[in-house]
Image (tube, helix red, strand yellow):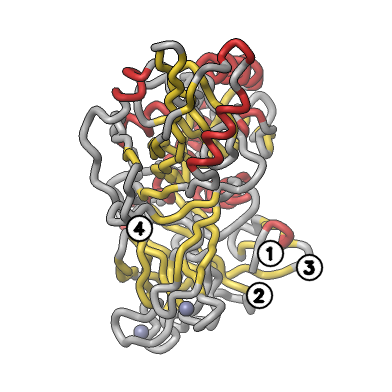
Amino acid sequence: MISTAVVSTECPTCGAPLDFDDEARAIRCSHCRSQLLVTGRRQVLTYEISARTTEAEARSVVRFSLSADRHAARVRHGSLYLVPYYRLTAEEITWRSGDSEQQRRRNVEEVAAFLGVATTAGRGPADLADGLDEGGPTFASRVIERNFVARDTGVVPHSLGVRPTALQLRLFDRGEAREGTVLVPADLTPREAQERALGIAGDDTGIRERLRVVLQIVYFPFWMMPIADRGVERVAVIDAVTGTIVRDDVEPAEVAKLSDGRPRRVRTLGFRPLACPNCGWDLPFRPDDLLFQCSSCERGWLARGDRLEPVVFSVAASAVEAACHLPVWKLGADEDGAAVFAPAFRCRRLKALFDLGARLTRQAAPIARTDEIPKGLAGCALDQEDARALARFIAAGISQEAARGAVRPELPTTVDAVAAELVWLPFSSDGYALRESTTGAPIPRRLLDL
Ligand SMILES: [Zn+2]
Ligand SMILES: [Zn+2]
């Protein structure tokens, strides 16, 4: 899983400190018990990291670091610069032939080393890799996590690198009094940043999709400390979180250039009460879920941006008693022939979701729906956009099987425009696994958080 950052803010209801995982969709204040929806999903949100070193500390760090031959140098008062970095996280799924895998990893490492980009996730093992069938392509998934400075400059490190502690993010606040602080504008647009972050691993072998892509802007603090030595001025750059010297020989003109350009529009996450927009009833508190089902009026709501949007969902009828119901996106309407299925529940292995989706899609059976909505439907963790990405991937795998001679249903040529419907399917239980009732496809229980 993606290593997360922690957001530190204050409860909008009672003002108590509030820390939460930056992926949480709903939070509960431990002080006043307010339940809040975190808004801003799918938007580029801006955060900042607070300085932990004062100007006086930064000055003494520089003074003590001066070598003996610069004993006459004077360290002048410095300024705090907030420098924007883009941070992107995503889960990537690929089909590729086995040979290209090693080559691809070498390429990624080479390019990353050249750019000085953190490849923590890239270096880690792909979370799994196994062949669909003999001679077929290989399914692999991995987590991508990248960050890089949002403008062309050599004054500060290209990336924030690998930090031993979780990133402590605060909501960016431009209104705060910031005397002596320089806000450095970003040059790269979010679109350029996303292309750069995802393009680094680019190779054209196989099929690739990315799920849960999150792009953030994180302002990182650096002290710029001028050093005057025999009529020559240089600037020392101090990481204001760790208090360490990053560079001590920067031309003042280079630092001045950091102020060029215009600040971009800033968007931060927000909160709204976790209540049904239709009837006002409290929605169930499930921090990882995207879909909130009102237990009073039974409507479903999907969190998107800063709104809760209504979602039509249905439940498939079951011949036998179901142990539970899990959500699946069905891409393609009943009358258009075969649909592509993208499982949408939270599961520790994307491969298990993929396998179930592929089996449901190959089976191409119509779904009988029931009006009886069981209590406690399992949560939905995949929004429509990600469901379409997973469905494109499943459809591509199935058309490759067809190309190798297997009998497969005729799928929609593109799943981007077809109707999307969220259906809860019944699963039976055999102890270790839940089994989808029509295909018998197993999902090991240990992969689920139910
Ligand atoms: Zn509170
Ligand atoms: Zn309601």
Q: Which mark is residue 323?
A: 2
Q: Secondary structure at mark 3?
A: loop
Q: Secondary structure at mark 1?
A: strand
Instruction: Give the residue at x 51% y 41%.
Output: 56
* Nearer mark to the viewer, of 3 and 4: 4
Between 398 and 189, which is closer to the camera in this rendering? 189
Q: Secondary structure at mark 2?
A: loop
What residue type is disc 3 on?
Answer: Gly
Picture quarter containing residue 262?
top left
User: From mark 2 to mark 4, how far is it between C-alphas?
Assistant: 35 Å
Percent coordinates x, y for residue 343 in the rendering: 52, 55
Instruction: Give the residue at x 32% y 56%.
Output: 176
Q: Is residue 416 left or right of residue 346?
A: left
What residue would you read off at disc 4? 40
Instruction: Give the residue at x 31% y 34%.
Output: 186
What residue type is disc 2 on?
Answer: Ala
User: From mark 2 to mark 1, how far is it between C-alphas?
Assistant: 8 Å
Number of other residues with Cα within 10 Å of mark 1, as a class: few under 14, some 14 to 19, many 20 or more: many
